[in-house]
Every structure is written in structure tokens, then in C-alpha cells.
């Protein structure tokens, strides 16, 4: 599982001219699901994202998590995070999970974040989406689940 995480002051996602997800202070997550991902990677990533201390405290140090600051999540599916650009000029996507596998994992990711008390908005899986954000910091991180780090 791979996440591109951006700390934002605001973010929204639009599908067919309509906003389907919108947050204020929080995190925009572009979520890529690998062909070999399972609930194990999902559990690890949810805990990592929710607990990551990347929000400033009163001393302007990154000591607070999303939960500490009462921030929200905007989660957008992003199969292109597993695009392989090593050969040729057209990326290959054989490492991205097919929709029949990725959709249930994506939906479970959203549900688990909600169960932890986080306000969650999302895009629409497989749709042509337009994402708008105001990156705060800027803070942008790429996080791979441990199984991907070993491979």
C-alpha cells in the first residue's frame, strides 16, 4: 500500500462538476493499493496515517497527530501510484490492484478511519476526479507499507 499524504488547510475532490468530498484542516491522502495488499497492510497504514505527528504544537514543532488537532481526512484512490516508468515511455500498472480487489480495501480503509473518530471525506473510486488543495507547510510525505519496503 502506498500513500502520498499532504497536510492541507483545505482540500476538495470534484467528479463530473460536483464536489463529492471537501475538508478544512487535515490530510489529503492519495491511496494506492498494490496487487498483493491485504488487511495487514491496511491496518498498518491506517494506524500510521492517523498517528503520524506532522501537525505543529504551540512551539511550532511537529508533535501533533491528526487526532490531536481534530483534523479531517480526504481520501482519494490513486492507482497510478503504482505506475512503473522504468521501461519505455508509457507507465505500466501491473502492480496496481484491479478494482475487484482494490475497491473493498479502499472502502475498508475509509471505514476504519471513521471508526477511529476521524471525519472522513472521499473521492469516487475509478472516476475522473479533479483534486484541489492548499498544501500547508508544505508538508508532503510518501509512505509505503512495510511489505512494499522489503520488495
Image (spheres, helix red, strand yellow):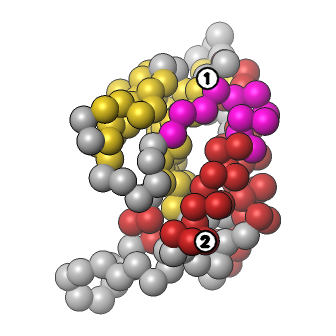
Query: Mark 1 or mark 2, which has the lower sequence index?
Result: 1
Q: Residue at x 44, y 21 (%)?
A: 9
Relative to 143, residue 134 above or below: above
- Helix, strand or loop for disc 2: helix
Q: Residue furthest bottom?
A: 87
Q: Nearer the viewer, residue 127 or 82?
A: 127
Which quarter of the rendered picture does the N terminus lie within?
bottom right
- Helix, strand or loop for disc 1: loop
134 inside magenta stretch: no
Splitting the image into 4 quarters, where does residue 137 fall? Answer: top left
Query: Disc 1 versus disc 2: distance between alpha carbons?
Result: 29 Å
Mark linked to residue 104: none
Q: Position of residue 17 (x, y in %)?
A: 24, 35
117 inside magenta stretch: yes
Residues packed near mark 1 inside 10 Å, few (<14), some (14 to 19) or many (20 plus) = many
Q: Residue at x 65, y 78 (%)?
A: 36
Can residue 4 be spotted in the picture?
yes
Relative to 29, residue 147 above or below: below
Residue stretch in magenta: 112-122
Q: Position of residue 24 (x, y in %)?
A: 48, 20
Splitting the image into 4 quarters, where does residue 123 fall? Answer: top left
Relative to 57, residue 62 above or below: below
Q: Which residue is under mark 2?
A: 101
Residues packed near mark 2 inside 10 Å, few (<14), some (14 to 19) or many (20 plus) = some
Q: Position of residue 100 (x, y in %)?
A: 57, 71
Q: Residue furthest top?
A: 58
Q: Which residue is under mark 1?
A: 71
Amino acid at each position: 500500500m502506498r500513500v502520498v499524504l499532504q497536510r492541507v488547510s483545505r482540500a476538495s475532490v470534484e467528479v463530473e462538476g460536483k464536489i463529492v468530498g471537501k475538508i478544512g484542516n487535515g490530510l489529503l491522502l492519495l491511496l494506492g493499493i498494490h496487487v498483493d495488499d491485504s488487511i495487514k497492510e491496511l491496518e498498518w497504514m491506517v494506524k500510521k496515517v492517523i498517528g503520524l505527528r506532522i501537525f505543529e504544537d504551540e512551539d511550532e514543532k511537529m508533535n501533533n497527530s491528526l487526532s490531536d488537532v481534530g483534523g479531517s481526512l480526504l481520501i482519494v484512490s490513486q492507482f497510478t501510484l503504482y505506475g512503473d516508468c522504468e521501461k519505455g515511455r508509457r507507465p505500466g500498472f501491473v502492480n496496481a490492484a484491479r478494482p475487484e480487489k482494490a475497491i473493498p480495501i479502499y472502502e475498508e480503509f475509509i471505514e476504519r478511519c471513521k471508526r477511529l473518530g476521524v471525519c472522513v471525506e472521499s473521492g469516487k473510486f475509478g472516476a475522473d476526479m479533479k483534486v484541489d488543495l492548499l498544501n500547508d507547510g508544505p508538508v508532503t510525505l510518501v509512505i509505503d507499507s512495510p511489505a512494499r519496503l522489503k520488495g
